[in-house]
Image (spheres, grey):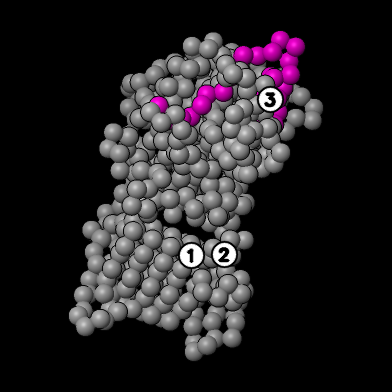
Amino acid sequence: MLNNVIVFIMAGGRGQRLFPLTRDRAKPAVPFGGIYRVIDFSLSNCINSGLRRIHVLTQYKSISLARHLRMAWDIFNGELGEYIDVIPAQQRVGDMWYRGTADSVYQNIYSIAQEKPEHVLILAGDHIYKMDYTEMLDFHISNKAELTIATVCMPKREAAQFGTVNRDKKGAVISLEEKNPKAKGISGREDCVWASMGIYLFNTSVLEKELVEDASRSGSVHDFARSIIPKMLKDKRKKRVFAYEFKDKKTRGPLYWRDIGSLDAYYNANMDLVHITPQFNLYYKKWPIRTYHEQFPPAKTVFVEDGGSERTGMALNSLISEGCIISGGKVQGCVLSPDVRINSFSQVYDSVLMEGVNVSRYAKIRRAIIDKDVNIPENMEIGYDLKKDKKRFTVTDSGIVIVAKGTIIEKNNKDISVHSKGVRKRQG
């Protein structure tokens, strides 16, 4: 275990662009990849990197997240100095809630003072990736950096979605811009930019000083990317700020990293898992992704009828979690969370189905995200007529249909009623 580093994981964002998946839960608590929650990836990276002193900073709709952390991550030994602390806004140094990423750490600055680490690692709780943080720490120390920002090479056309870093040949950071569609390309690779991964490694003394100064600075938005780091880069005594490149040691190419901040990004990241050779490999045993496993029975497929019958339980190019029963229906290119039921003659393509979803007979679904505990009625079609779907559900610009958690869909002949929490929508 690395005793000279403590970790803060930002897990308090509203996740507005992921609505309705974040209607009842924080973004890091959104299910992903069948059996996981999004925060499991950052936490697993910590454990696999030997980091076991972790603070998870929560704020909005945190009950589901806190429950998951209690059930899945109660693996630390306090006698050895290990812990995972879930910390909502304490109002310890003021009467306000967290005003930004930097402010959330500032409001818990007493934890840093108590622990006295040499370094503080700041992580986002809503990204999908596998990273050995010790390699970033080695880079930080070897460059005598005061702050190191993790970066990854991303297509320039996506620059408006990320903070972008401009650095020199030695890796020293010149500037950090937030979501600039005209960001400067990488020298020699003008079609790419250095995207900030939202991962920051600080020397503790530097972080404490910057947080205290920022807390009283008029006009600050109290954010690392928009306040703290730009100020550090503009100081008369320019700080030693470096960019760590997240890349494959063998190919030298960028490793997999996704910010699932939008519904389309979330859907695409799930679809990355179902290919024969997936872009993001969940099956590497030396870097396990941990989570909580409920006591479900094994998944199974049933019904195989001869003579060309469509009543055949079948799953192709899909992730099928425990407790799922594919009973005479077809699933292709899908991610199924535990306890999903696919009934006879139904068809589900290129979709994400969360826990407890039931797809009734003859129903057809494609390019959709169905949140937990939804029953899809017989003969219902989702994803085949987006004009109708927009009247009933959320539909993204790329045509992904999202059915919110617990949505009640009632079908009576051609009349369909969709409602949740007492709100009804009816279409003939």
Label 1, label 2: how far apart the Cα atoms are: 8 Å
For badge 1, the amino acid type reads Arg
Q: Which quadrant of the structure image shows residue 57?
A: top right
As shown in the figure, which amino acid type bears the numbered disc 2?
Gly
Do the residues under discs 2 and 3 have CB atoms within 8 angstroms? no
The percent position of residue 267, horizontal first and vertical second, equals 49, 55
- Whether residue 230 appears in magenta in the rendering, the answer is yes
Q: Magenta stretch: residue 20 in it?
A: no
Percent across and percent down for residue 358 are: 38, 70
Q: Secondary structure at mark 1?
A: loop
Sort mark 1 into few (<14), some (14-19) or many (20+) by Cα contacts within 10 Å. Answer: many
Mark found first going from the N terminus, 2 or 3: 3
Q: Identify residue for label 2.
A: 399
The amino acid beneath tag 3 is: Ser
Q: Earlier in the sequence, mark 1 or mark 2?
A: 1
Point out the stretch of residues depicted in magenta.
222-249
Specify the farthest residue to the bottom: 413
- Quickly name the residue at label 1: 367
Nearer the observer, 203 or 8: 203
Q: Which residue is mark 3?
A: 175
- Give yes or no for contact between labels 1 and 3 (Cβ–Cβ under 8 Å): no
- Does the CB distance between marks 1 and 2 fall below 8 Å? yes
Q: Position of residue 166 (x, y in %)?
A: 65, 26
Q: Residue at x 70, y 28 (%)?
A: 227
